[in-house]
Image (cartoon, rainbow, N blue to C red):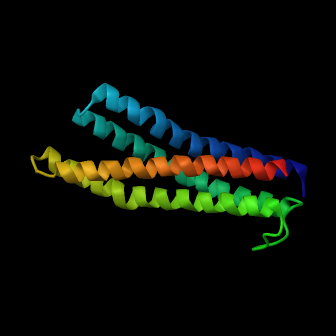
Amino acid sequence: MYPSLLALSLFLHLLATVFWLGGLFLLTLLVWPETRRSLADNPQRYRLLDRLRQRFQPFSWISMVVLLVTGLFQMTANPHYEGMLQFNSPWSRAILLKHVAMAGMVICGLLLQWRVAPALRRAGWLLDRGGRNAAEWQRLRRQEVRLARISVALGLLVLLFTAMATAL
């Protein structure tokens, strides 16, 4: 393997990690709580959060694709790699746990993008039009926050398992 190709793969992998996990952490741990404090129940707050979510989604999905491609390349180039579905070493088990945590993050992202966010938008639209759907909107908002927090926790696990595999 060419060292320059591996270096490029590592660079892209790290860049995608910064975009995906950094964006997720920033939104979940800083932006959402601060908008809640600053804008309280102002309807503009929810429009802002929806727009931020929509702007972040393409970055997160592109980052996931880059992580998948570069990660598979790096994994097969690693001297610890023994083959697909071979978990005989601590390194391969750490990589397996990392991939399980990443799969959990992908599932959370899919649920957020295809289930919760559209329902939240619809409930917010009805609420803006004088509908009496505040309880449903609140339930969906709590679900959104819960899934985002789970994603943050899984992201931390991804970093932990990556560090464990790297240390071996």
Q: Quadrant of the N terminus?
A: bottom right
Residue at figure coordinates x 44%, y 43% from the top left: 55
Q: Is residue 44 above or below residue 127?
A: above
Q: Nearer the viewer, residue 21 or 135?
A: 135
Is residue 97 shown left or right of residue 138? right
Q: Is residue 57 visible?
A: no
Tell me if 29 is positioned left or right of 66 in this view: left
Measured as percent of width and height from the top left, residue 72 is found at 74, 62
Residue 28 visible in rendering: yes
Indicate left or right for 14 with 92 as reference.
Answer: left
Q: Position of residue 35 (x, y in %)?
A: 35, 31
Quarter of the view holding residue 61: bottom right
- Report the residue at 41% width, 56% height from top: 113
Give the total of numbered labels.
Answer: 0
**Residue 82 versus residue 59: which sits nearer the camera?**
82
Measured from the top left, where is residue 78 in percent x and y? 85, 59
Quarter holding residue 21: top right
Residue at position x 47%, y 47% in the image? 149
Which percent across, then down, holds residue 86? Answer: 79, 72
